Amino acid sequence: MAADQGEPIGIVAGGGTVPLHVAEAAIRAGRRPFIVAIDGEADPGIAAYPHEVLKWGQIGRMQAVFVEHGVKELVMIGNIRVRPDFSTFKLDLGALRVIPKVLALLANGDADLLSGVVALMGQLGFTVVGAHEVAPDLVANKGPLGRHTPDKGARRDIARAMRAARAIGVIDAGQGAVAVNGRVVAMEAAEGTDGMIDRVGALRAAGRLKWSGRAGVLAKCAKPQQDLRVDMPTIGPKTVTAAASAGLAGIAVEAGRVMIVDRREVIDLADRSGIFLVGEVTQPEPVA
Amino acid sequence: MAADQGEPIGIVAGGGTVPLHVAEAAIRAGRRPFIVAIDGEADPGIAAYPHEVLKWGQIGRMQAVFVEHGVKELVMIGNIRVRPDFSTFKLDLGALRVIPKVLALLANGDADLLSGVVALMGQLGFTVVGAHEVAPDLVANKGPLGRHTPDKGARRDIARAMRAARAIGVIDAGQGAVAVNGRVVAMEAAEGTDGMIDRVGALRAAGRLKWSGRAGVLAKCAKPQQDLRVDMPTIGPKTVTAAASAGLAGIAVEAGRVMIVDRREVIDLADRSGIFLVGEVTQPEPVA
């Protein structure tokens, strides 16, 4: 199906290639993507899709562009490297109407900002949906995703790492953890998933963690309270490469709640590296 | 009080200077320390105290030495860098009597090993006690320990970081966490407390974490199930130096359950660096 057919879907694109994968997956799912890219953030690859580049603050123009292209549903996706610099804000008339509300939102923490932006889009007449709703094939399904499968020891590490990832998610601290031979050796916070995996590799290289062959599991899951419409945990080819380099045996992600960017390459890399990749259904735990 | 007076207390010393601080604190508390140092692990500073250096496996000799010096209570303290290499084990007759039990213990995980060693010492006629029982002034008390105190923002970070440290303790994954401006930015596992603090400093230096002046709190607490007799969380001068270098505003430790090694230097360093140091009473949370 081509990009000029199907029900329109708006994509507000931050940085990175994830928005491109969402656009592709939307097309596969029979939707017609239109991208509004944030100037200075978006990947040049958006040029392959109908799009317009706007600056922070051009909210009225964004609304007009989406209306013009028949967009009723929006996906907001991609990295925002920095909070917008208000001194360079280009405020249009549409922005002036909503700016007091936006400023009030920005004064709060991240979670409030994100849910506030969803509410703001609602005021402008758009429904914010999750990428997983537009393109279900972006999300991990249950069971093995590649050709390798976890053995008994790896299943124990999956359970340990998933439990740690859930526990830190419950307290809104992180999404990922690594367990090796039954022991949690790393938990993710501000350093990000790749930073955490690299640390495990460095501790092993320094002899502070020891195992032979491949062992250990990276687990990643969404926080129980996470709004998947605006903030979904993601793995991609870089995650697999990092896990393979660190000597891990595999990766477990929460089925239905973690996005796999570039699934074909991810599975191919996992298969060739000899590491497993599984989707796990996790049980909710009581909030501490 | 001198080292040749008071009720004897045995110290089985691994590496680092902590065993020396325990010996000093024991003398201050009116005890007479005798150190059995593990060859290749113990700090040369043990020479200042009555001691004997033994190799791994000289369990019969250890028993005889302690009996000879009237020791009934033992503190086991200090770092063990590596698990003993059985090929270099020097087994004495006392060891041969207990070695089947020791081997069975070593086949299990760390927690089992430690509690098993406590049971083994009991079989040999000794009671293992915690350093905090012998020398209460080694342990953090409640309230400010230096002259700086947390402000309102820092109190919020104490609560956030303590909550994260407790949550990862409940799942037996770690003991420490750092929160900055209301957000958990690092959690400790295999990298250790200093490694975690250094990471926060590196993320700040790389612009991935931003704050001006001093902000953020390192929290450290014992795991709920931790056997403080053989494995007590510790902070020392290096912890304070690392926290100060990373730009943190202060350190919070669980009162009564975290050891402060070299308290005078720790407090002096904190005071001079402009960071606070507080003992916090934490509430147990339901096990996840």
Image: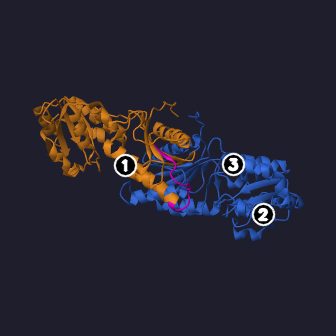
Chain colours: A blue, B orange
Q: Secondary structure at mark 2?
A: loop
Q: Which mark is residue B269?
A: 1
Q: CA distance from mark 2 to mark 1?
A: 48 Å
- x and y percentages locating residue B222 in the rendered image: 41, 37
Specify the quadrant that holds the C terminus of chain A. Answer: top right
Tell me the chain of label 3.
Answer: A
Placement of B4 over or under B274, stated as above or below? above
Read off the residue under disc 3: A107
State the image quarter where residue A40 is shown.
Answer: bottom right
For image coordinates 16% across by 29% down, the residue present is B6
Q: CA distance from mark 2 to mark 3?
A: 19 Å
Q: CA distance from mark 3 to mark 1?
A: 36 Å
| Same subunit: marks 2 and 1 | no
Q: Amino acid at mark 3?
A: Ala
- x and y percentages locating residue A196 in the rendered image: 50, 55
Local crowd size for mark 3, using a 10 Å CA cut-off: few (<14), some (14–19), many (≥20): few
Main SS, magenta region, reads loop
Specify the quadrant that holds the N terminus of chain A. Answer: bottom right
For image coordinates 82% across by 48% down, the residue present is A122
In front of the other: A244 or B272: B272
Q: Total label count? A: 3
Magenta stretch in the rendered image: B205-219
Q: Secondary structure at mark 3?
A: loop
Q: Amino acid at mark 2?
A: Lys
Tell me the chain of label 1.
Answer: B
Q: Amino acid at mark 1?
A: Leu
Q: Secondary structure at mark 1?
A: helix
Q: Nearer the viewer, mark 3 or mark 1?
A: 1
- x and y percentages locating residue B260 in the rendered image: 34, 41
Local crowd size for mark 2, using a 10 Å CA cut-off: few (<14), some (14–19), many (≥20): few
